[in-house]
Amino acid sequence: MSEDQYKECKKYEGIINLFKTSGQYIGGADSLFDYYKMQGQERSCPSCISRFLLERYGEIERYERNM
């Protein structure tokens, strides 16, 4: 994860952490999906959104651990 990606993901940390702890996606991450160029059909796929949010969570964790 680059520094720019980290900064972008940190804007959505609350949404990402809520998903990690509760499994609920409340919405509000459309700009993050745009940033990562997530396609339309992926955005309507619950398992795709789950994978995406969990990947971002793991990347944030690794970035912070390495810094």
Image: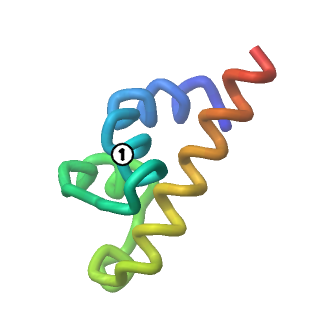
Q: Position of residue 59 (x, y in %)?
A: 65, 42
The residue furthest top is 67
Colour option used: rainbow
Drawn side of residue 30 relative to residue 5, left or right: left
Image vertical order of residue 27 relative to residue 67, above or below: below
| Label 1 sits on residue | 18
Drawn side of residue 28 relative to residue 46, left or right: left
**Residue at 20% in and 56% down:** 26
Quadrant assignment for the C terminus: top right
Drawn side of residue 64 relative to residue 25, left or right: right
**Residue at 53% in and 35% down:** 5
Q: Position of residue 2 (x, y in %)?
A: 65, 32
Image vertical order of residue 39 relative to residue 58, above or below: below
Q: Position of residue 48 (x, y in %)?
A: 46, 76
Drawn side of residue 64 relative to residue 26, left or right: right
- Structural crowding at the residue carrying mark 1, measured as other residues with C-alpha within 10 Å and reported as few (<14), some (14–19) or many (≥20): some
Q: Amino acid at mark 1?
A: Leu
Quadrant assignment for the N terminus: top right
**Residue at 56% in and 44% down:** 57
> Is disc 1 placed on a helix, strand or loop?
helix
**Residue at 38% in and 55% down:** 22
